[in-house]
Structure formats: C-alpha cells, structure tokens
Image (tube, helix red, strand yellow):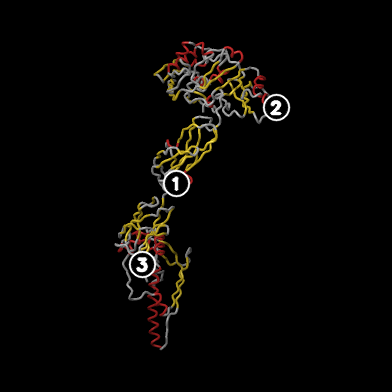
Amino acid sequence: MNNLTTIPASTGETLSNTEWQLADMVDAIAAEIDHAEDTLALKSYARGMSFSIRQLSLDLQVSVRRDNQGQVKFRTADPNSTGTTTIKLDFAQLLKSQLGDDRRKLEQTIDRRPLDAIGFTVDEIRALNAIAIYSVDDLHRYTQTAAMIGEVCRKTSIAEAHLRKVLGLPYLEALKPDRGLPGSIVLLEGGNFGIEQPHSASVYFQGVVVPIVAWSNSRIQIKIPEKATGNGVIFIATNDQMTNPIDWQVVTVDLMIKDIVMTPSNPQDNDEITLTATLENQGLGTANAFAVQWSIDGNPQPKLPHGVLAPNQTSQESTVVLKTRLAAGKHEISFMADPEQQLQDLDRANSTFTLAIDVAPKTEIINLGYHYLIDSLDPFVGEQSWDFRQDVLSLIYRGLMRFDPYKGRLLTDLSQSTNWSESLTVTYSLRPNVYFHDRSSLTADDVVFSYQRAKESPIWREQLRFIESIEAIDRLTVMFKLSKEFNIKAEAQIWTLPIVPAKAYQTDSQRFMTQPIGCGPFIGTLDEGQRKSGLVKLEAFENYYLGAPRTRSLSIALSPDANRLLKLLIGGYVTAITLPYQEGLVEKLKASLPTDNYQMIQTPIGQSMVLHVQARSLLERQPNDYETNWNAHLWYL
C-alpha cells in the first residue's frame, strides 16, 4: 500500500499524505495479513505450536469527501487536525463452512468485463460506480429481481427499459397511443419479448389479463377492455419474467348538462322564450360528433346534430339553444346529449337536464299614475321641459343612444355602432330594420331632420348648440360635427334625442301633439278630451325592433294632485305612481300604506327628485336613477 498516511522516514523526511479509497485500504491490509500469516506459519512449524491472527481492529482518524465522479475519497488525518471522523475496520476469522456459504464457487463464471463493454455511457457508468457497481458481474449480482432492478434505476436515474435491454431482459419503451378510449388497440414497443408468443405469455392492464392481438419480438398489440375506466399500468409476463410497467390512461367522454338558462326569466303566455343549455365535456377524451335533443312537456323534439366537443370545453353550438312559445301554466323542458348513446359516456345520468317553467297569464293592461299633466306628446313642442315628459314620451320615441339604467353610461339604441374622431366628428351607424309606428323604415335622413327640428325648439336648443353640422352619409349612416366646447359627459343627453319620421312630421306636425309617430315600444294617444282629464293610452307596437312588448296596453293617469294618485293606488285602480319628493313623505306613506304590499324608490328627474310608490306585484317596472321613462327597456324584455 502506498501513500496511506504520513510516515516519518529515517532521514527525517515526510511522505505525501494523498487520498485513498476504502477498497485500496482493504487490499493493502489483506496483503499485510497474508504476510503476517506466512510469518506465523513458519513460527508454528519451527516450534510445534499453532499461531494465527484471530482478529484485527483498526481505528483511523480520516477526513472524507465525494468527488465529482461520485467516488468516496479518504485522507488520513494529520496530527491535531479538526473536522475529522473515525473509520473502524474489524477483520476476523471465518470457519471454512461459513466461507463456503458466502463465497462464489470457483467453477462459477465471473463476467469481469467493464460496464462500457455492454453499452453504458460515461455518465451511466459514473452513476453505477457510485453504488459500487464496477463490472458486468457486479451489475448482474445487483439486478437479480425486478425490485432490485427498480432500486438500481431509482438510485442511478437510468431508464428501466434501457437497463433491462442491456441485461437482455424483456422491456417496454413506449405505448402508442399513451391514452385512449375503452376498447382501443394499443401498440407496445420494446424488445426481448420472444420471436414467437410463448404459451404462458400474458399482458396485464389494471391487474387484469387483456387480449393479445399481435406478437413479435419488439412489438405487441393488445386490446383495452370495453368497460375499462381510469388509469392503470401495462406490463408483460413472458418466460417467467416481467417487463417494466408503463402507465396507460383510459380517456372517457363525460357529457354534462349543467343548467338551462331561460330568457325572459318570468315569461308570460305565448311570449317567445329562449332556452340555452350549458353543455360541457368534463371527461378526458374528445367527444366525436353526436346528437342532442330537446323535449317539451315529455314530447321529444327532432334530434339535432352537434359537432366535436373537446375535453373541458363548453358547447357554443346553435343546437344548444331553443326558441319556443308556451301557453300559460306549468311546463317541463328537457335537454339531452347523445340520446342515441353513440359515445362511451362515463356518466349518462348527467347527460340530461330538466327545467320546470311556470308561464304566467299575459298581462294585458297595466295602469300607472303620474304626477304631472302632459300638454303635448310632441317631443319638440310644449310648455314643459323634456325632463318632465320623458317618463311617458320615451315609451313612444327612442334615440340614437340610451342610458344604462344602473350606471348611467351611454348604450346603443337606434344606433348599432359609434365612431369618434380626434377632430370632434362622430359617426353613427343605424340599425337596419327599425320601423316607425307608421311602418316606414328609419333612415339617416330622419335623424338629420329630428336634430335640425330640435335645434329650432326652445326645449332642446340650448343643449344642441354644440352641434355645428349634421350630414347623412348614406341611408344608415349619419355624421355630426361638434364644436370644441362640447363635453361628452356634461352633454350626453343630446344623443338620447327622440327621432321622428321626417316625411310624416313635415306633412302633419300638429298630429304629433296627440297622435305621435315614433319607433319606441308603444304607440301613444292623447285625445283633446283626455288632455284635461289627464289620461295617456299606450298600445304595444308589434314591430318594435327589440320585439313586441310583453304588456299589450299601458294606461297612465296624469294628475298633479298627490292625494288623488294615492287614492287610485290604494283603491287598486293603478299599480304604481310617482310623486314629487318631499321631506318626510316616505315616513308619512309608510304609516298609511301596508309596506308588505308596496315599495318606495326615490330617483332623480332633472334637477328634482321623485318618489315611486308601486305594488310589489308589479315586477316589470323597477325605477332607476338614469332612465326613469317607466323603464321602457324592461317592458319588452
């Protein structure tokens, strides 16, 4: 043994203290023991006595490190050094019978080839050396069972298929595809399976033997059971040996109907109802094209086609939407995915959803009370400002824009899009197929005329002073040129200006005071006799662009007498009234009205405040801060 420790030489020199490995130490000590045993044997022979070494114990102070190749290196500690540890070596005699059990038989073949001789890379050899595998013989001794192979692979990060291939054992490298539907044919790629299928060979998935379709030394085809679900491992048992296992996933379709959404949410007799089913594939596999089917009151509707639906995808196809009309009463609407059961659905119970619907009788007439007398239904003529009349007149007329009833933002109304330029030019594109009450179509010329007429009116003149010019670009496009003083936030109401049909207004403007023509959801009349009695009648306009109003008629009693309106409300002649807001009015009304039957809502109107008092049974009209025109946008939803 060389350079194991620092040994003073006779000349006073010190030998180099280099690193050493444990195997070198054991080899050196074994050589020393052999030499000592030879000396003792001579002594025994000369003296007629037996001398031998029964046990040798060594305690060495050393420092330890692991090099970049994974080898453990020791260095004998220098005198008085710190940070060292003690390595203890015990050598003892073994009986011959004991030695026979532990030592390899001499006639047994030992494969001393290096690891690179059987195809390992430098990095793999380094990893094997780190767990004391230096030769092919070492490798075979450490990989005698499947568990031992797995442990070697875990410690060295060598792929099990590669290690098995080197050892000449059957192995699996890949499964194609790596997932699939129940009943799929799966190709197993690997090697050392055997050129011909052994009689006892089997392939297992989820612990169950599966049918073998084809066999060769490196490729095997199997069929996954039709009723298989979930994940599992595939492995081969052949010639009393098992391959490494590989995960395989059964991907299944799971069509789930989560909900059916109905619009409107409180339909009335013969209203058009839109039903939208929320259909999602929450399985792991793609659902190929399938059918869907609606059912109304137990009567199946025609089956409709549906396209491919990927995993975790929600359907956006038109067949999940149903438009229908139902009579007043209780109904059941069902929606079913894959009624023909063409797909291997994981859970068919959630592929159907049923919604119960209660359709109310049609509300033919609603009577309302309003605290002002209206002198004219013409939006440009009258002694009253637009603020005092808009609650009624906005049911008859509509503008390019309207206010969001809750946040006050401008929303499109008769216009479908708006384009603002940096030069304060704004262009509106009108909706096609918008009709006035006289069945004439809305055009850009009607918008230009309405704004020009409004600029001549004292009701609108001040607000419209920022409009420098108006031009019809084409039949459905109108452009406004605005002055630099225009403020969109302060002057937003100019875009809600009522639009009238130009030809009808030019022909007979007087009729607009009592029999106006607009394009709102209701047709209004105010006869001469009614102007004094205070009664406005509104009839539903069937061709309103958002659809016919759900309420056929509105009757609005006009009176500045708050007590009269209260009597009409309490007597059940009207279902809602508005009153000028006064301090203490709410408390006074709560004392005289049963609060369980009525609700009170305070909203602004112009610079004033009004109080809405209405029966709780009136669900159509919920007053808001911005569009207090009897919520025209609600009457036709």
Q: Nearer the viewer, mark 1 or mark 3?
A: 1
Q: CA distance from mark 3 to mark 2?
A: 98 Å
Judge whether residue 421 can be spotted in this image: no
Q: Which residue is mark 1?
A: 254
Q: Which quarter of the rendering shows the N terminus?
A: bottom left
- From the top left corner, tell me how far across and down residue 422 is, in percent: 43, 22
Q: Quadrant of residue 320?
A: top left
Residue 17 location, quadrant: bottom left
* Front-most of residues 429 and 574: 574
**Three-letter code for the amino acid on which mark 1 is drawn:** Asp
Q: Using the image, determine if residue 9 lies above or below residue 120.
A: below
280 versus 182 height, above or below: above
Foreground: disc 1 or disc 2: 1
The tally of labels here is: 3
Report whether 193 appears left or right of 361: left
In terms of sequence position, does the residue under pointer 1 or pointer 3 come before the other?
3
Residue at mark 3:
140
Disc 2 marks a residue whose amino acid type is Ala
Q: Residue at x 40, y 39 (%)?
A: 305
Kind of residue at badge 3: His
Distance between the alpha carbons at the discs numbered 1 and 2 = 59 Å
Name the element at disc 1. loop
Secondary structure beneath label 2: helix
Mark 1 Cα within 10 Å, few/some/many (few <14, many 20+)? many
Give the percent coordinates (x, y) of residue 345: 43, 47
Q: Which residue is mark 2?
A: 591
Inspect this view and state whether residue 43 appears.
yes
